[in-house]
Structures are given as C-alpha cells and as structure tokens.
Image (tube, coloured by chain):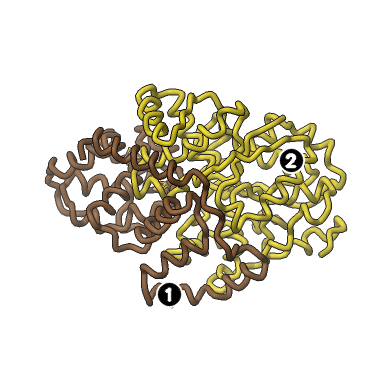
Amino acid sequence: MTERLKYDAGFAKEIYALENGHYIKKCMQCGMCDVSCATRREMDFSPRELFLLMRAGKREEFFKANTIWMCSTCLMCKVRCPRGVPLVDVMHDLKSHAIGLGYADSPQATFYQAFWQEVMGRGKVFEGGLMARYYLKRGWSEIRKGFEMRDLGMDMVKHSRISLKPPRTIKGIKGMQAVVEKARAQMRKEVGG
Amino acid sequence: MRYSFYPGCSMEGAAVPYLKSLEAVAGALGMGIEEIPDWNCCGATVASGVVGDYPAQVLAARNLALAEPKGLDVLVPCSSCYMNLALVNRKFLEDDHFRAMANDALGAAGLRYNGTLKVRQIIEVLVKDVGLDRIRTKVKKPLTGLRVAGYVGCQTPRVFPWEFDDPEQPVYLDRIIEALGATPVKFPMKARCCGSSHSITRPEITTGSGYSIITCALEDRAQIMVTPCPMCQMNLDAYQGKVRQHHKLEASMPVLFITQLMAVAFDLPPAAWAFKYNIVSPFAALERFGIKP
Ligand code: SF4
Ligand code: SF4
C-alpha cells in the first residue's frame, strides 16, 4: 500500500458494528501483530494492513484478501497487541461476515462450513464426514490434491487413527440445535443485522 | 480428585491414543474422571468463524450446563476445547448481560448454567492438583537421560496469559517431563503454531511449520517430542512423512501425547502406552528403557 490513503468511514462503520468490531478502533498500527503472526508469510495483507484497508474503505480488496482465512487462531497477536485488540475474535467476526456476504470461495471457507454442518448435524465432528463434505464441495481439483495425500491417509488407517464409522449423534441434538438457533436469533436482534 | 471430563471430538477419532493413555494415567494417579453426559462439540476454532462468537460460545456452554449438577471441575485435555470452554466459562462469571442472554438461549433446551464450575486444562491439573511430587512417586521407570521436547502448542498457554503459564515460553509441561526423570530441552518453538487445520486446506503450510518445529527440537538434540494437543500431535506425527517429502529432515521425531510418556514412566502395561496408533515409531527412542513392540 504505497499510494496515499484517503479515509472513508462508511465501510469501517459496517465493520465496527460487528460483535468485536469496535476493538479495531483501538488499533494504532504499530505492527506487532504483523511480526508475531504465525502465517504472515501466507497472507496477502497482514492484520494491521487489513485494518488500514478497512479505514481506506477498500471493501473488495478487504474481502478478497486471504488474510482472515490464513489466521490459524494461534492467539499470539491477541497476547501481544499493546492496545488489547483481540484480533482472533475480530477474525472470527470477519470470517462469518465474509461468508454471510458470499465471499466464501476459499477452501478454508468451504472447510469451515463443512465443519459447521457436521456439528449441527450430529453434535460432534466426525473426521470422515468432514472430509467427505469438504471434498464434495470443492470438486475435482481439490480431490486431486487430496489424492496426493493418500499415503498419509493409508498411514492413518494402518495405525487405526481414522475411525470409519461416525460417532453416535448426541441424544440432545434437537435441543442443541434449538439453543444455537435461539442464540443466532438473539445476536441478529442485538446487532440489528 | 474427581473431575467432570470433556474428551472432545478428536479423542473419538484421531486422538484415541490420548484417551487410552490418559485414562490409564489418571487411574494410576488416583484421579476420577467422569465423562460429561451427552456432551457436544466445543466448536473448535471454526464455529465462531461461521456463526460468530456468541452462538459458538453458547454452543460450548451447553457442555458446562450439562456438567454443572455434579459440581466438579471440568477437565479438558484438547487445547481448542480448553480455549472455548474456559473462555465461555469466564464470560458467565464476568458478564451479567452475557449470562442472562446465554441462559435464555440454553433455556430452549431446558438448560441453564450458573457459572459455578472451573474449566481446567490437563497440564495445569497435573502440576497444580496432582502435583509433581505425586507424579514422581508413581515413576517406576525413570526416563533418565531421555531428551524430550515439550511441545505445548499455541492456544493452551495463551487463553489466560500468565494466569496459566508463560504465554510464549511455557514451563509447566517441562516440569512434568522432569518429574518423569527425563530432560526437557530448551526448544524455543514450543508454543508456536503447528499450522492447525491448514493441514486440510493448505497442507504445505502445516508441513512448513512442522519442519521448523521438528528442526528446532532436533537442534536441541531432542530424541522424542511430547504434546498435550491432539491437533499438534496429528500435524507433527501423521504429516511427518509429508514434511520429509518437501524438506530435508535430519532425523525422525516420534511425537507422543504427554500421557503416553507418563504411562511408560509409570511402567503401566503396553495397552496404556497405546503406541500402535503412533505413525512415527517411538520404539527406537525408548529402547534402552526396555520398551519394545
Ligand atoms: S498489534 Fe494491535 S495495535 Fe498493533 S497493529 Fe496489530 S492490532 Fe493494531
Ligand atoms: S491468531 Fe491469527 S492473526 Fe493472530 S498471530 Fe495467530 S495466525 Fe496470525
């Protein structure tokens, strides 16, 4: 980002309204998160730069950047940020907001949604079910990549590390679903979204 | 010493050796662990990225509501499960508005949580409740001279920095390794990220992290690595072959759950070691202690 920044408050407002969005207001652009981040090298923009994009109102670049999807929730930035910005929680908001807006092309977004479907379906995550959902959704290119991992899969099977049958669906699944639905409804009401 | 026990999804899948060794070690130490009835997934690092923090926290809280009638501390071995359950537990304690809202949601299943429990990570329980002295008295086969890299992983020490341990250079795991008679190596990468679920979506990130972490342990002449985290164990053990394909690894590094090494030092039967599940074999490293396949 070498061009001079013009601030545009509209987009920032949208982000500040997210559950943990207001914390970003405290960011002083010190760069501690950049140097601490486990996956900085994989990111199009560092967390700090992402917040700068937001302030500049660069909506498309913001959501198309892979930054939020590269975050592995290692908590290093949250521990180190001198302004107490809980970056991990902000990343959660940004991920779910991005999915809600349809910026969900990345393999990670697919993986996240597949995982969530597993949780809501049986109350637990069955690794086999998760992988099936993920590969079905991603299609051929990813299946080919998955194929390259087949020796790893064979090792896992040989050492009984992959359970071939799913765990029993929890007894209270209906109740659990109702609790989550209720919580989501409360949140929609609270943030007015 | 009785605990409500939250195994988490991984213990029913890839982390079976964790469950087997932990049950045996807990028995030897006189800890009673009682599985939370009908527990559900904690949401891992993923649920909040789909539905946002609040619904994911309420999902995790269902487990605490189910555990509360027993009134026992909740023992959590997995780092992500610990993060989610411990964080939501604190919200119930500190945030009245949150508690009221969340109980309203839990009410949809006839549940309620009053925030009376403590959520405890296994490393902390081993050091603070069980105590290093008690662990030492159970050691029948001191692992003298064994150089061990204690890989804590990223989340466990950083959920509540300093309340639990040093968030960047934690020491509790090393104290347990010492109590077993072994030598913890310095291993400055002991709390760096293993690459987490990138193992599925971008495996080269995970193999890159794995390479740095294993190399760091080898530089300090570690012969074996132990961890309390199911994700770390999987990414470093099962993916080690992939690491080797893409990077030049000097040696192989067996990666055990800490409870597996405890089972060896306590001289428990082989079923408690649960080594048949380990992909990188630990037998060469443990041979001189009479550990054979
Ligand atoms: S460490 Fe905190 S204050 Fe510094 S740039 Fe990152 S978010 Fe902003
Ligand atoms: S929590 Fe995410 S953004 Fe923060 S340092 Fe870790 S990977 Fe980077």
Q: Is residue B15 above or below residue B93?
A: below
Q: Which chain is brown?
A: A
Left or right, A157 with respect to B269, comes to: left
- The structure residue drawn at horizontal position 69% and vertical position 33%, both measured from the top left corner, is B127
Residue A10 in percent (x, y) is at 13, 42
Q: Is residue A27 left or right of residue B184?
A: left
Give x and y (percent) for residue B197. Answer: 47, 57
**Viewer-nearest residue: B58 or B147:** B58
- Any idea which chain is the yellow one in this picture? B
Residue depicted at 29% across the width and 63% down the height: A105
Residue pointed to by mark 2:
B26
The residue at label 2 has a CB less than 8 Å from ligand 2? no
Element carrying mark 1: helix
Residue that appears at 19% across and 42% down: A14
Q: Is residue B78 above or below residue B15?
A: above
Q: Quadrant of ligand 1?
A: top left
Query: CB at mark 1 closer than 8 A to ligand 2?
Result: no
- Among the 4 quarters of the image, the one containing residue A134: bottom left
Determine whether, in the image, residue B159 is placed left or right of residue B223: left
Give the number of the disc on residue A143: 1
Quadrant where the C terminus of chain A sits is top left
Whether residue A167 is visible to the viewer of this picture, yes or no, is yes
Give the residue type at disc 2: Ala
Q: Nearer the viewer, residue B171 or B135?
A: B135
Badge 1: few (under 14), some or many (20 or more) residues near its Cα, within 10 Å? Answer: some
Q: Amino acid at mark 1?
A: Ile
Specify the subunit that label 1 lies on: A
The answer to whether any part of residue A74 appears in the image is no
Q: CA distance from mark 2 to mark 1?
A: 41 Å
Crowding at mark 2 (Cα within 10 Å: few <14, some 14-19, many 20+) = some
Residue B185 screen position, x and y as percent: 69, 48
